[in-house]
Image (cartoon, grey):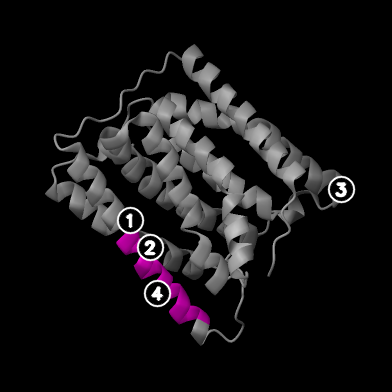
Amino acid sequence: MEVNFNLGNFLNTIGGFFIAGLFVYFLSRLLKVKYEYWKFPKPKSAGLAALTLVFITFLATTGLILLFSQNSNSPGTTLSKPIDSLQDFLAQLISATIFIIPFVILMLKRKEPLKSAGLSKQNLKASILIAIGLLIIPVALWVWKFENVNNLGTTALTVSLFFFFLQNAVIGFYEEFVFRGYLQTRLASWLGKYPGWIIASILMAMMHISIRIAWEGFTPLGALINCLLIIPISLFLGYFMLRTGNIVGPAIIHTFANWLEIQ
């Protein structure tokens, strides 16, 4: 699968996420959100440990993707295909949990609390409210599309679609925990708030390349272009984390961004 890069659409995407970023900034100011990045006793050590574990996890994930894609009867099958059963969803949930465990173990070993990865009550309410504010228009447009364009109404909300939403919720939470909560926080402590944000956001986008090639059938160039197109939303989600220090809001946006884009 190849991807045709459209500069105009790409610039529009950047503009859209820039406006969304302004919304996050002003609403976080309105809600009087205050957050200072976690100060690690040895920031360089924490940053290098985070980078190492993320790359190890990436290599392990890539290996599994290659293994399953080679054994698949339909190579190039997209990961975005909806799952249709509780069993499929539980399998996805277990897989994500297994990949999160090494991060939790390393945090425990280094005596780093969960709130150092954006899992805390701090700014939780504000993070959720900002996410809801950002989603009002996209969700309204989604409902309008089903009721007016496709004339499907509530019949479109099938069990399969519900489980597909849960699948995206698992992916959204997992990726936000790893790249925003864990990696970005530690890189920000080591390299500075903004360099940490930018590096973590770019890495998050680029680490989708193997999935695009091995499982979704993209050519290497197509996969690279597709992952470059992920960078604007990755930067936006990282900025959301930057303002609130809580991954719940970004995870909600991530979930709906994946789910609504497919529809």
Residue at 67 percent of width and 50 percent of height: 261
Q: How many marks can you see?
A: 4
Q: Quadrant of residue 73?
A: bottom right
> Mark 3 highlights which residue?
149
Marks 3/1: CA–CA distance: 42 Å
The magenta-colored residue range is: 55-69
Marks 2/4: CA–CA distance: 9 Å
Label 1 SS: helix
* Type of the residue with mark 2: Phe
Q: Quadrant of the N terminus?
A: bottom right
Marks 1/4: CA–CA distance: 14 Å
Residue 151 shown left or right of residue 235 in the figure:
right
Q: Nearer the viewer, residue 239 or 103?
A: 239
Contact flag, marks 2 and 1 (Cβ < 8 Å): yes
* Type of the residue with mark 3: Val
Question: Around disc 4, counting alpha carbons within 10 Å, would you say few (fewer than 14), some (14 to 19), or many (20 or more)?
Answer: some
Q: Is residue 71 above or below residue 47?
A: below
Contact flag, marks 3 and 1 (Cβ < 8 Å): no
